[in-house]
Image (cartoon, helix red, strand yellow):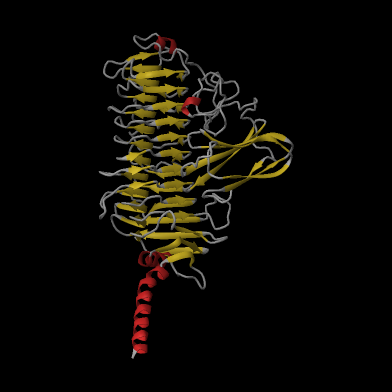
Amino acid sequence: MMSKKISVTMLFLAMMLFTFATPAFSQLSGIKTIGGSSADYTSIEEAILDLNSQGVGSGGVTFLIRDGIYNENDNLEIVDVNSSIDNPVLFRPNTGAEVEINITISGDFSSAFRIHNSDCISFNGTALGGDDGERNMAVNGYRNENDDVFVFWLSNGSDNCTLENMTISSISEPEYNMGWSTPIYCSTYEVTAPEIGMNSFTLHNCEVIGASTWSVFMDGGDYELNDFHFLGNTFRDFQKYGLRLVNGANNCIIEGNEIYQTFDIARSSVYGISVLSGNVGTCIHHNYIHDLKHSELSGCRGIYLYGNGCGNFIYNNIIHLEPGLQANTSYCLGMSSGNGIDNQIYYNTLYMGGIDTRGTDSYCLRIYREATDLIAKDNLLLNERVGGSDNAHCALYILSAETMAECDYNFISVNSDLASDNRYVARIGSTSAVYYNSLAELQDAPDYSPRDQNSLTGDPDLSFPDLHLLETSICISEGIPLIDLGITTDFDYDERDELNPDIGADEFYYPGGVSDEGSLIPAGLILQANYPNPFNPMTTLRFVLDETAAVQLRVYDLRGCLVRTLVNANLAAGEHHVDWLGQDDSGHPVPSGIYFARLSTEGRIETRKMTLMN
């Protein structure tokens, strides 16, 4: 009798153990394959459905997509998944694979892929084992007549998500010019609970093509979107906005992107980067904005900040605009009215050109508010736009002589000193504007001194269309160093002269007197991609020297501040390697983010981008 009781008890305990253990064993972890023969899943949709159903197990799960074209249903939604930094989810091509994903998006507020209330979800288009940065995956979202459709939609509570190394296209068939066709949509609008914001989204090294309105749209609504990073992407062929931050986007970084259009498709005025009121701490740097093609009787704006934004930091950008003949008022960099504080503008090159037949104004830098704490230094403003009547083409436009707290060491010019044309170095005032034909006149304007007392004018001698300095430029060595602000590199991430930097985004001379002429990286000086990348906490950097040399290998953060010196020594020719443990020079761990490894030998420099994920 006792034996039977023990047997029943043991059976009961075994059943209970099986019941509690089953969910853990069924969670997804390790490597899963999609497509091809003997795969875990035949489609991406099947894999996502299983992910939503089973959840994520220890160490996370990687879905390897095999070579091929995938025609998937729309609304592939990753919802309420228990992923985390320790248990992430990754979709990427398998070794040697080229992946094309085609999705027809069939209804308003529908998407190709959606990530909702799920953390640490990543799509990396570089094939497993491939060279970092290769784009081996394309996602094409096909749109019909519906208005509000998105290729990737990130919504409430999705933190630490990443899209990188992909081509992302929003394609209309046939061409529909209205509505909100958007490749990347990050918003709390029209979503179900929980209604919360999002943190730490990264879009890196993606080519984002097409949009009836925005390439990227961010709107926190009543909730915040914090620490969003847009790094090294290409945004092209959108109809209105390249990148738009609407509300509640704080401490965002917009760095190293190229924004342009290849043909006339716009349906209104066109903006490269637009940051609306209520955003705080946006850092916009190292971006190249050019060829913005507006519709008839509209205009173009390179970077536009609405006035209530605070703590925006704008530097090392190159903006080259040539509006159409019938353009509306256009400007390279503008700020609207409002009460935003602590905005700073440094080392930008802003060029306005083309011919005007309509008679509307154009400006390189337009500050349309009394921003008495604004600082502008080391900027190159050149407006060579011509034509029109009863209008003005100006390098600088401010509301009053006291608009900016500090404004100096700039280059301000229209490359003309003729009093008879409608090109002016500066305009001060709105309804009762006063125009200044030369820099000397501006310097003597009532209440303007001591602003721009060390600034220059004339012909800056630029190369076109990249707007880099030629060796004859008068902007060389005429700037003021801003090392205390952490700006130590130029648009190309080359080191600036610590004592006498150049004006504008480009630094012509490198340390040691090496110029932009010719190849910066000679054969035999090679800094290889770090491995692993992303990494936590250690990565290895390998480099090759063609001769014995004094070598410096340093790590910098996104703002160009030195984080750690890894090598500072004479090394023999050959291959070398060094590990970085994700620490600064004091031995303290540094936070997750993008870092740059810079190898220099006697003026020769090479840089690699690294991603640390703690």
> Is residue 561 placed above or below 1 in the rendered structure?
above
Mark yes or no: residue 529 visible: no
Q: Give the side of residue 264 with respect to residue 596, left or right.
A: left
310 or 394, nearer to the observer: 310
- On the image, which quarter does residue 570 sit in? top right
Considering every residue shown, the one lying at the far front of the view is 2
Mark yes or no: residue 573 visible: yes
**Residue 256 screen position, x and y as percent:** 48, 38
**Residue 593 screen position, x and y as percent:** 47, 43
**Residue 113 screen position, x and y as percent:** 38, 57
> Is residue 323 placed above or below 22 in the rendered structure?
above
Q: Give the side of residue 334 with respect to residue 599, left or right.
A: left
On-image quarter of the N terminus = bottom left
Residue at 44% x, 56% y: name it: 86
> Is residue 237 placed above or below 424 in the rendered structure?
below
Considering every residue shown, the one lying at the far bottom of the view is 1
**Residue 11 screen position, x and y as percent:** 36, 82
Q: Give the side of residue 457 with respect to residue 103, left or right.
A: right
- On the image, which quarter does residue 429 sit in? top left
> Is residue 96 placed above or below 569 in the rendered structure?
below
117 or 44, nearer to the observer: 117
Q: Tag count in the figure?
A: 0
Residue at 30% x, 21% y: name it: 370
Residue at 65% x, 26% y: name it: 512
40 or 381, nearer to the observer: 40
327 or 609, nearer to the observer: 609
